Every structure is written in structure tokens, then in C-alpha cells.
Image: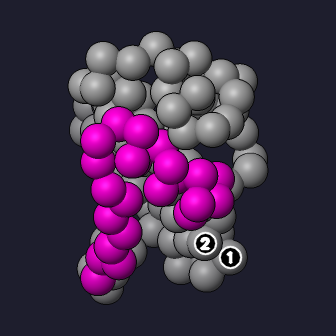
């Protein structure tokens, strides 16, 4: 077996084991949500043709808050009212969804 395939198999096995732990799964999902929020805020702002400062002003927040959200590296989760203001400021609306968990892959 090639080295890359061995590494992938090891990582896959580690994740399979880790995802069996409900606490790990919750933490992983929270981190993924923060990353998705960062991408969504950045995309909406850029598509609206706004700078971080302009978005902050329209959303009644600070530029540093927008930068923090876009970085995806902050452990704090933004509030729904803030995300709604950002959506409105970029000409969008906030949409949330729950995905069904695939029993095989987690």
C-alpha cells in the first residue's frame, strides 16, 4: 500500500473512532459551523461590494467584529441578531438548516 493511502486509512480510522464520541461530534460540528459562518459572511460582504468597515456600519457593529467573524478563528459564536443584521446589510436574509446525519459517515 502506498504511503498516502496508509495515512488516509489511519486518519479515516481515527475520525471514525472520534466521531463515535458524541462530545467530539458536537465540538467538531461547532467548529465547522464557525468556519461556514466565516465563509458566508466573507462571501456576502464581497458580493455586496462592501469593505469590512462599510458592512460593520450598515450592520451596526464594529469592523473588528466583522474581521473576527470572517477569520473563523474565534471561539465565540455570533448571535442570530448579529447574523441577521449582516444578512440585511448585504441584501440577503439569514437561512438556517439542519442536515440529516449519515449513520455510516457521521
Residue 77 in sight = yes
Q: Which residue is mark 2?
A: 26
- In this rendering, the answer to whether 4 lies above or below 52 is below
The residue drawn where x is 37% and y is 59% is: 94
The residue drawn where x is 39% and y is 47% is: 88
Numbered range of the magenta stretch: 78-100
Q: Is residue 44 magenta?
A: no
Residue 23's tag is 1
- Image quarter of the C terminus: bottom left
Q: Which quadrant holds residue 30?
A: bottom right
The residue drawn where x is 30% and y is 17% is: 49
Q: Are marks 1 and 2 in contact (CB under 8 Å)?
A: yes
- Please state the horizontal and vertical placement of residue 68, each as a whole percent of the image: 66, 30
Q: How is the image coloured?
A: one colour
- Which of the two residues, 70 or 91, is positioned nearer the viewer here? 91
Q: Is residue 71 left or right of residue 86?
A: right
- Which of the two residues, 90 or 64, is positioned nearer the viewer here? 90
Q: Secondary structure at mark 2?
A: helix
- In this rendering, the answer to whether 72 lies above or below 18 is above
- Which of the two residues, 85 or 16, is positioned nearer the viewer here? 85
Amino acid at each position: 500500500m502506498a504511503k498516502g493511502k496508509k495515512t488516509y486509512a489511519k486518519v479515516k480510522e481515527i475520525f471514525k473512532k472520534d466521531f463515535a464520541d458524541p462530545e467530539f461530534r458536537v465540538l467538531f460540528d461547532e467548529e465547522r459551523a464557525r468556519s461556514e459562518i466565516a465563509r458566508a459572511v466573507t462571501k456576502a460582504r464581497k458580493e455586496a461590494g462592501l469593505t469590512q468597515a462599510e458592512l460593520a456600519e450598515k450592520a451596526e457593529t464594529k469592523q473588528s467584529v466583522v474581521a473576527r467573524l470572517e477569520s473563523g478563528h474565534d471561539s465565540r459564536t455570533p448571535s442570530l441578531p448579529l447574523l441577521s443584521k449582516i444578512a440585511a446589510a448585504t441584501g440577503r436574509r439569514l437561512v438556517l438548516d439542519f442536515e440529516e446525519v449519515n449513520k455510516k459517515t457521521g
